[in-house]
Amino acid sequence: MTDATLVLVLNSGSSSVKYQLIDMADGSRPAAGLVERIGEPSFPADHAAAIGLIGAELREKGLGLDSPRIAAIGHRVVHGGRYFSRPALITDRVLDEVRRLVPLAPLHNPANITGIEITRALRPDLPQVAVFDTAFHATIPESAARYAIDTELADEYAIRRYGFHGTSHQYVSRHTAELLGRSPESVNVIVLHLGNGASASAVAGGVCVETSMGLTPLEGLVMGTRSGDLDPAVLLHLQRVAGMSVEEVDVLLNRRSGLKGLCGDNDMREVTRRMAEGDQRATLAFDVYIHRLRKYVGAYTAVLGRVDAIAFTAGVGENSAAVRAAAMANLDALGVELDPALNAVRSAEARLVSTESSRIAVAVVPTDEELEIAEQTFAVIRRTDE
Ligand code: ADP
């Protein structure tokens, strides 16, 4: 081992690249940023230009992409299909597999691949690791992963429930156990990742057994702009009766639904502000959002049998006391008692917001996907060093 202890975490999206440089020796983050609006006039022309800008920002801090202190690059990759159930050291073969999965994530995987190709060309000597959004959910049993459709057809087209936000669910479930002072193996947790995208997971003894997103990130909870669950016949109906095309339905469900579709605003801050002014549509949107969330909490309680903690995370989960209060209201029969005073406290720390007598602990655990990616990346390269 050298004293290279920095991991560069890259999240290449279709029009942006996010980065963080994390020092695994002490947890410090010497650099972080976001290059946006790739391809728009007067912004970076393409991903290569965006990563060039990131290189320049890093160089200003004396830690250019060529720095010997960088041990590895960790890439967030959205879809790992059934092939990847753990992070993978990137080789030509791994990259080919990620390319093969493009039909399952046509918007996301191509941008992830482009990011990897560019950094591999810039630093062919540096180990690079792919950390998949789906990997943590690879353990969900067939009974939860299968859609009840023709098995041969489903297998031919790889149609099953994969789940997403896995890096966050993994990080938060582990840190919830830590907050309780217990080992992850001894704790059953329901994780509610409520950001712009939103998903729930049931984690039994550190192993994910159910999650709300499916083949794509559209299934499950009500989100900022995505519908979550709906009768699949709604799509057929819209195509037959409203004459909508496949693309139009895609845009409707992914970008014009959820809170946005219900009330015109996708930001929970705006929704609760309007509610306080007595706005009916915003109130309905909030109610639909909460109803869905509570349904999942009930369902996952049955899936797990015994629940030790419910953990809220991501933008809404970490910041909206109103969402937490409504989602956890009147659950005494389940053993959940929120402490209103603790719930109202704003903090960036992991914390409990339930009463001492609550049988199920309710926690707010800020997620840190970048740190989780860096840790997994570092673990992979240390294994390969041995
Ligand atoms: P992403 O899914 O884009 O990573 P985040 O986890 O950052 O999203 O969550 C973004 C969302 O968090 C915003 O759209 C907003 O609805 C919500 N949010 C952020 N801050 C607050 C707050 N103080 N109160 C309520 N909601 C908030």
Image (cartoon, rainbow, N blue to C red):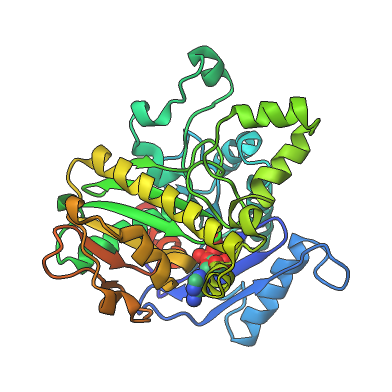
Left or right, 311 with respect to 68, comes to: left
Extreme residue toward the right, this view: 41
The quarter of the picture where residue 182 lies is bottom left
**366 up-or-down from 206: above or below:** below
Extreme residue toward the left, this view: 357
Q: x and y percent of residue 380 in the render?
A: 39, 54
The one nearer the camera, 252 or 375, is 252
The one nearer the camera, 149 or 296, is 296
Q: x and y percent of residue 324 in the render?
A: 37, 65
Q: x and y percent of residue 246 in the render?
A: 75, 33
Q: x and y percent of residue 369 in the render?
A: 45, 63
The quarter of the picture where residue 15 lies is bottom right
**249 up-or-down from 340: above or below:** above
Left or right, 180 with respect to 286, comes to: left
- Please give the name of the residue rendered at 59% of the width and 40% of the height, measured from the top-left corner: 98
- Please give the name of the residue rendered at 69% of the width and 51% of the height, measured from the top-left corner: 256
Q: In this orientation, does residue 36 appear?
A: yes
Q: In this orientation, does residue 72 appear?
A: no
- Please give the name of the residue rendered at 27% of the width and 79% of the height, measured from the top-left corner: 341
**Which corner quadrant holds the C terminus?**
bottom left
**328 up-or-down from 50: above or below:** above
**Which corner quadrant holds the N terminus?**
bottom left
Left or right, 86 with respect to 181, comes to: right
The quarter of the picture where residue 207 lies is top left
The one nearer the camera, 316 or 298, is 298
